[in-house]
Image (cartoon, rainbow, N blue to C red):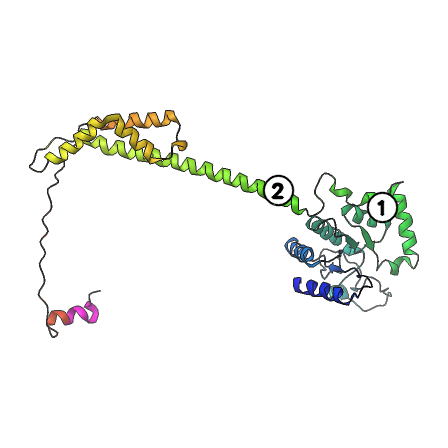
Amino acid sequence: MEKLLNEVVVERNRIAGGTGLPKIAVKVACDLSEEELGDVASAVRGSGMEGVIVSNTTVRREGLGLKSSTSSSIIILLPSSRHTGNKTQLGGLSGRPLFPYALHALRTLRPLLPPSIPIIGCGGITTGSDAVAFARAGASLVQIYTVFGYRGVGTPRLIKDEVSAALGGSNWRDQIGRDWEGKQMGWDEARLKRESEVVRREAKGLGDLLRQLNEGDDTKRLIREAEVALGRLRESKKEEGDGMAGSRDNAMGAKTSGGGTARAMVESSRPPLMLEDSTREEIARTIEEAMDLEPEEIDLRPIMVIEQELPRADEDDEWRRAATGGSRRLV
C-alpha cells in the first residue's frame, strides 16, 4: 500500500503542470482490524495523501441482521421471487447494515491521522442523524450512495434539513470531533515525542532502582556467606603441623588488621552511592566480629602427583584394536 500511494502522489505531481494539484483520498474498508487500520494510517501519513474515506462496502454477512433473500440492498423482490439464499453471496454489501461498522472504523482511524488529513465519512448514511454521528466521530464531510435508491433524487435536500434540525442552531463545523472532547483526536508527532521521552525516563529510573536493589541483595548475600565461612573457624579445633605456620600467620594478620580491612572490603565491593553510611558501618561491624574468631589451621602441604607414562601400544596390539573399534570403542 505504501508503494501504491507513493507512486500515485508522484504521478499526480508530475502531470500537474502548473494547473493545480487534484486532491487524492484513499478509501478503506470497515472490515479491517484495528492493527490493519493502524498500518493504513502509517502508509497515509508517509505518502502525502490529502484525505481518507471511511468506509467502503463490507464482505461480512454474519451479524448484519439481513432480512432480504438477496445480497443487494437496492433490489426489490417480488413475492414470487425464487432468489432464496442470495444474501449469503460473496461481494461488497452497502446500505444501512454497513453503518455501525463504518462508524467504528472511523473512530479507530481518526486518532491515527494528523488533523491536517480530513476523513470523509461514508457507509450506510440514511438520515441526518447518521451524518451528524459521523461528524461527531471526526468526519469533516460525508458521502451518500445507497440511500438514493430508497429516498430518491431529493435525498441530499432531505438529509440537509434533518441535519439542520439535529444541530438545533449550531453548525456542522462545531460538531466535527465532538466525541473527542477532552481526548486527543488527531495524530500529534510532538505529543508522541514528549510521551516517549517520559516513558524513557521512567524506564531508566525503574532500571536504576532494580539495579540498586539487586546490588544490595548481592552485598547481603556475600556478607552472609562470609559470616558462615568465618563461623566455621570458631567451631574448628586447632591442629599443629609442619606446614601450618605460614597459614596461621596469615590468618592472624587478617585478624589484627581489624576494622580497617573490613571497611576496605565494604568500600571496594560496591560504589559508595549504592549504600548508605549506616549500612556500610553495619556491614563493617559484622565483618569485624567475624574476623575476631579463631582461625582454623589448614594443612597447606602440597599434594604429591605422580605422573606415569603408559606404554605405547603397537598398531596390532589387541588392546588397541578393542579400544578403537567395535562397540567397545573409547570416546
Residue 240 at least partly seen: yes
**Residue density around tag 2, few if under 14, some if 14–19, many if 20 or more, within 10 Å:** few
Look at the numbered discs 1 and 2 and tell me whether their residues touch, using CB distance below 8 Å: no
Q: What segment is highlighted magenta in the picture?
A: 321-331
Q: Position of residue 64 (x, y in %)?
A: 74, 56
> SS for tag 1?
helix
Residue 54 at least partly seen: no
Q: Judge whether residue 324 is colored magenta.
A: yes
Residue pictured at 16% horizontal, 68% vertical: 323
> In the image, 71: left or right of 247?
right
Question: Nearer the observer, disc 1 or disc 2?
Answer: 2
Q: Choose the circle earlier in sequence order: 1 or 2.
A: 1
| Quadrant of the drawing holding the C terminus | bottom left
> SS for tag 2?
helix
Q: Judge whether residue 185 is colored magenta.
A: no
The residue at the far bottom in this view is: 316
Q: Give the quarter of the image for residue 272.
A: top left
Under mark 2, the amino acid is Arg
- Residue beneath disc 2: 194
- Residue beneath disc 1: 172
> In the image, 185: left or right of 278?
right
- Tell me the CA gap for discs 1 and 2: 33 Å
Q: Position of residue 151 (x, y in %)?
A: 90, 57
The residue at the far front in this view is: 18
> In the image, 251: left or right of 162?
left
282 over 188 or under it: above or below: above
**Secondary structure mostly seen in the magenta stretch:** helix
Which label was assigned to residue 320?
A: none
- Front-lying residue, 177 or 19: 19
Under mark 1, the amino acid is Trp
